[in-house]
Image (tube, rainbow, N blue to C red):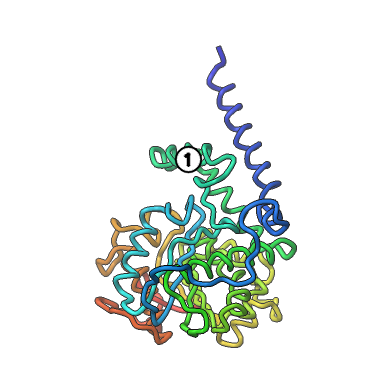
């Protein structure tokens, strides 16, 4: 019989092999879609579907989930609770949350895919054992799609495909092309990078300013920042993952004064706002309903309030219930500050 060490070596070897295959295949979905080999064909125009449409909204907020999502309909519970709270707090806003940002065809990992059976098994494993090594392959696969979005070679194709799916999601929510209703993309973690990458294509298609909210986002100095009307980057001072963007992407360094990131900052279109002592992963992350900050609110409620303050300052209708700290408050745990 194989001993435990041999079994562990086989498991680790399998995980590494799957990771390497994921790296190699990451751009192929976008390239295959662009070439017409798989998925939906390119659409020259996107029109609202026939039949009943929701009433037009004053503003549209598109939520792009983090890398733990498996489809547009299956996202972690904490993210789903945040989306529900945003809908309740934004009476004039249509919140769109059915776009899967890690696919150019909006096909979830549990959808019409060759290895859908594997992703479903991994999702069931993750529900039972969230920290299991194999369960992290969903996270890893989606991270590679973020890297494709940020890549100067493949990114334009990938981001165009996601922008097309965002347009379709907007139309499903009642958006009328030509209405000039404002659009905000809200990306958590890797979703923030994809939001920035998709923005130029949305601006061109809709002919309206598009603004972006990043929550703990890992963002490069993407060319899409040139077309973002405003971007708010909200982060926690204990969030090591979002800090990777500052360290690994030279365009984020202060010395790169001509990068798109620093130009957006200099022009006043980019604000980096530290909102408290948040981690990227639980506990005490942006979706933590159980642990409390010094003022007694949960971490999740504090993150929600920071989002609502940003939207309120942007002139959007917000139903405010408890927002004790203005955006200009002094730095401190549970308070908001700018870097």
The front one of 207 and 123 is 207
Q: Residue at x 55, y 80 (%)?
A: 270
- Total number of numbered labels? 1
Q: Quadrant of residue 18?
A: top right
- 165 left or right of 25? left
| Residue farthest toward the front in the current orientation of the protein | 51
Q: Residue at x 49, y 58 (%)?
A: 66
Q: Position of residue 21 (x, y in %)?
A: 67, 41
From the viewer's perspective, is residue 256 above or below residue 135? below
Badge 1: residue crowd in 10 Å (few <14, some 14–19, many ≥20): some
From the viewer's perspective, is residue 154 above or below residue 197? above
Q: Quadrant of the N terminus?
A: top right
The front one of 150 and 327 is 150
Q: Position of residue 41 (x, y in %)?
A: 65, 59
Q: Residue at x 29, y 63 (%)?
A: 298
Q: Quadrant of residue 173?
A: bottom left
Helix, strand or loop at disc 1?
helix
- Which residue has dot 1 on it? 120
Q: Position of residue 309 (x, y in %)?
A: 37, 79
The front one of 278 and 316 is 316
From the viewer's perspective, is residue 323 above or below residue 304? below
Q: Quadrant of residue 157?
A: bottom right
Let me know if residue 62 appears in the view. yes
């Amino acid at each position: 019989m194989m001993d435990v060490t041999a079994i562990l070596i086989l498991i680790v070897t399998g995980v590494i092999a799957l990771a390497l295959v994921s790296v190699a295949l990451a751009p192929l979905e976008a390239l295959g879609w662009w070439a017409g080999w798989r998925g939906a064909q390119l659409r020259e125009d996107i029109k609202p579907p026939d039949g009943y449409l929701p009433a037009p909204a004053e503003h549209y907020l598109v939520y792009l989930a983090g890398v733990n999502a498996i489809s547009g309909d299956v996202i972690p519970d904490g993210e789903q609770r945040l989306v529900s709270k945003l809908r309740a707090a934004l009476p004039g806003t249509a919140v769109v949350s059915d776009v899967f940002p890690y696919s150019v065809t909006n096909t979830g990992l549990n959808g019409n895919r060759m290895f859908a059976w594997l992703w479903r098994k991994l999702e069931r494993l993750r529900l039972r054992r969230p920290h299991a090594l194999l369960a992290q392959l969903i996270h890893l696969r989606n991270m590679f799609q973020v890297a494709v979005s940020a890549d100067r070679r493949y990114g334009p194709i990938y981001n165009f495909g996601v922008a097309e799916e965002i347009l379709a999601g907007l139309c499903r929510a009642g958006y009328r092309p030509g209405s000039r209703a404002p659009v905000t993309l809200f990306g958590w973690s890797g979703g923030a990078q994809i939001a920035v990458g998709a923005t130029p294509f949305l601006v061109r298609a809709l002919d309206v300013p598009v603004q972006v909210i990043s929550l703990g986002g890992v963002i490069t100095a993407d060319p899409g920042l040139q077309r973002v009307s405003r971007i708010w980057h909200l982060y926690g001072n204990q969030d090591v993952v979002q800090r990777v963007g500052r360290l690994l992407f030279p365009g984020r360094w202060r010395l790169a004064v001509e990068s798109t990131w620093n130009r957006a900052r200099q022009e006043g279109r980019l604000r980096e706002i530290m909102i408290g002592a948040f981690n990227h992963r639980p506990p005490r992350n942006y979706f933590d309903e159980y642990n409390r900050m010094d003022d007694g609110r949960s971490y999740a409620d504090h993150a929600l309030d920071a989002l609502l303050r940003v939207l309120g300052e942007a002139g959007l209708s917000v139903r405010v219930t408890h927002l004790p700290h203005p955006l200009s408050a002094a730095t401190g745990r549970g308070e908001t500050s700018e870097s």
